[in-house]
Image (tube, rainbow, N blue to C red):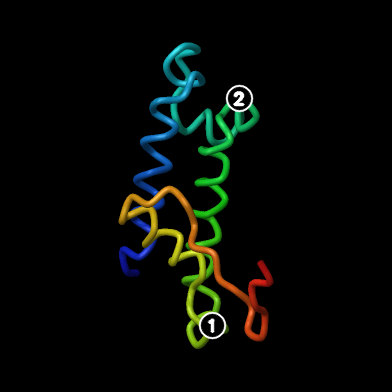
Amino acid sequence: MSNYCDPLLAALKDCVLHSDCVIKKGNLPSECIKHHIDELPEECRSLRLAAFECKRGMLDMRKRFRGNNAGATAARVKEGSASAPTAELPGTTDVS
C-alpha cells in the first residue's frame, strides 16, 4: 500500500494526543478513538472519518479510475491549509 493517507493519519494522531481524553483523563489514544469518540473534539472526529474514507477509497476498485477524493483531503492536510477549496458548478455564475 502507498502512503497516500499518511498525512491524515498523522494529523489524527496529533489531534488525539492533544485532546482532553488523553491529557486530562489519562486514557490511551486507542481507547479514545474506539470507546470515547464522543469526548474527542470535532476536528478529531472529522479527521477520523476522513482517514477511514481514505483507507476505504484505496481499496475501492471504482475509485481507482475516478480518483480517491479522501486522498485529496490528505493532500490538503499535508500542505497545511485549513480551509477546503470551493468549486463552482459548471454553468453557474456569480450574480453580484
Give residue 87's position: percent from left, percent from top: 55, 71
State the image quarter where residue 36 is shown: top right
Disc number placed over residue 39 in the picture, else none: 2
Count of marks overlaid on the render: 2
Q: Identity of the amino acid at label 1?
A: Met
Give residue 85's position: percent from left, percent from top: 49, 62
Q: Nearer the viewer, residue 96 or 85?
A: 96
Q: Are marks 2 and 1 in contact (CB under 8 Å)?
A: no
| Residue indicated by mark 1 | 61
Residue located 31% across and 63% down the image: 3
Q: Earlier in the sequence, mark 2 or mark 1?
A: 2
Q: Is residue 5 left or right of residue 83?
A: left
Number of the front mark, 2 or 1 = 2
Q: Nearer the viewer, residue 70 or 89?
A: 89
Q: Dot 1, crowdedness within 10 Å: few (<14), some or many (≥20)?
A: few
Give residue 20's position: percent from left, percent from top: 49, 19
Give residue 29's position: percent from left, percent from top: 44, 29
Spatial CA span between label 2 and label 1: 35 Å
Secondary-structure class at tag 1: helix
Secondary-structure class at tag 2: helix
